[in-house]
């Protein structure tokens, strides 16, 4: 399949009627799938009401069928056609964080959305993205759009159109190139079908921000205990993985360096994932800085592209520093742990 690439300037006026957006919207209405920039990562969109379109999303990504998709909308009132009711907590969160990187789980009205999109669940995950290109496209096509991240399943999520091309060129109808995304990690997923909302996946909106709006929040125990079953089906899968095995080092720089030297002595090409503050502290074959430790948002926004860079650099093994587990650090550590398949080496 020939994958069209549309370059779109997200700052121009009247984006909704930009010929490239109109072209992409027409393909979506025709049940083709199209990659689009959002403020978190690039998404792979398809008509959420169509089994044909949604099946194309799963096929292009190689995504397991039991992992439901997030439904994207341009206007809040679009949810009334497929959501049973809007609990008070959900309404407060929508007012505070939509548009933005927060996905809310609602009880669903049956028979409107493709059952494939919701993996046959009685609930549905919804988000209103805060990106001019995503907004214009969603508005132009006027239908709810199911969109997981636009990468091959298991790989790091795409934060540039180039990343999408690496994984999906030839498998999808088109890619809207709107430049690099901002937040860099996916949305926070919160279940509002229970009296006290539960975070199922940490992301762009932090626990602290959510608590400020609705008070008490629970966190899915599976996020901290790998023995319990996650409530978000997708959280049980390995994700975000670079090609080389990744180990998280819970210890000093000296301890990390010792592991690098050991592997080099065994003849391996070794990578280190650190931040700009610490790049000069290590000696290794490839040292990549992922933002600034002092500004964790910068770590989030460059994490996936750095994981992909290690693939290009063809290392055999990667050792990474870890990050504080609060604020956006929760999302960063969640993604790093998944990318590492939970391989953590602790100093004591
Ligand atoms: P992705 O599309 O890759 O950003 O992942 C979306 C995440 O939301 C996955 O972990 C899904 O399992 C999760 N999710 C989507 N719909 C639901 C739902 N109805 N209930 C619980 N988790 C969901
Ligand atoms: Mg994904």
Image (tube, grey):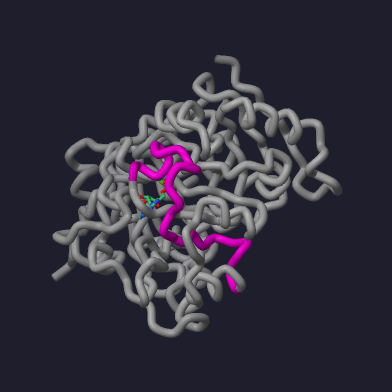
Residue at point 50%, 72% (across, down): 294
Q: Is residue 9 left or right of residue 213?
A: right
Left or right of 229: which side holds 37? Answer: right
Give the image quarter of residue 161: top right
Using the image as rendered, state which of residue 104 and residue 264 is in the foreground: 104
Which quarter of the figure is the C terminus placed in? bottom left
Q: Which residues are magenta?
A: 96-120
Residue at image point 49% right, 56% down: 83
93 lies left or right of 124: right
For the point 35% across and 42% down, which residue is it? 119
Query: How many numbered dots are placed on residues in this image?
Result: 0
| Chief secondary structure of the magenta portion | loop
Q: Nearer the viewer, residue 103 or 339?
A: 103
| Observer-nearest of 77 and 215 | 77
Is-magenta flag for residue 100? yes
The answer to whether residue 85 is left or right of residue 154 is right
Percent coordinates x, y for residue 115 in the rendering: 40, 39
Q: Residue lying at the far right in this picture: please name it.
A: 13
Residue 340, image x, y percentages:
27, 50
Residue at 24 percent of width and 49 percent of height: 341
């Amino acid at each position: 399949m020939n994958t069209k690439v549309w370059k779109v300037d997200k700052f121009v006026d009247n984006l909704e009627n930009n010929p490239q957006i109109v072209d992409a919207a027409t393909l979506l209405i025709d049940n083709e799938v199209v990659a689009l920039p959002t403020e978190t990562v690039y998404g792979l969109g398809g008509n959420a009401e169509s089994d044909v379109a949604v099946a194309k999303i799963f096929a292009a990504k190689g995504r397991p069928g039991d992992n439901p998709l997030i439904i994207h909308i341009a206007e809040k009132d679009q949810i009334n056609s497929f959501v049973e009711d809007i609990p008070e907590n959900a309404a407060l969160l929508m007012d505070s964080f939509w548009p933005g990187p927060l996905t809310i789980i609602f009880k669903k009205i049956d028979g409107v959305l493709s059952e494939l999109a919701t993996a046959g669940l009685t609930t549905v995950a919804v988000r209103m993205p805060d990106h001019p290109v995503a907004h214009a496209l969603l508005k132009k096509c006027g239908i709810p759009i199911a969109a997981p991240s636009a990468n091959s399943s298991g790989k790091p999520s795409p934060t540039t159109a180039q990343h999408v091309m690496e994984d999906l060129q030839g498998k999808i109808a088109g890619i809207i190139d709107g430049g690099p995304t901002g937040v860099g990690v996916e949305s926070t997923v919160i279940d509002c079908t229970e009296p006290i909302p539960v975070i199922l996946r940490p992301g762009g909106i932090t626990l602290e921000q959510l608590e400020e709006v609705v008070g008490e929040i629970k966190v899915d125990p599976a996020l901290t205990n790998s023995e319990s079953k996650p409530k978000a089906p997708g959280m049980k899968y390995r994700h975000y993985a670079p090609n080389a095995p990744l180990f998280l080092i819970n210890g000093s720089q000296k301890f990390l360096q010792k592991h690098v030297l050991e592997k080099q002595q065994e003849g391996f090409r070794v990578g280190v994932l650190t931040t700009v503050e610490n790049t000069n502290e290590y000696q290794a074959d490839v040292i990549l800085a992922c933002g600034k430790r002092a500004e964790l948002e910068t770590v989030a926004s460059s994490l996936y592209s750095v994981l992909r860079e290690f693939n290009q650099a063809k290392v055999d093994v990667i050792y990474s520093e870890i990050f504080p587990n609060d604020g956006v650090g929760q999302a960063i550590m969640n993604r790093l742990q998944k990318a590492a398949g939970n391989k953590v080496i602790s100093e004591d």
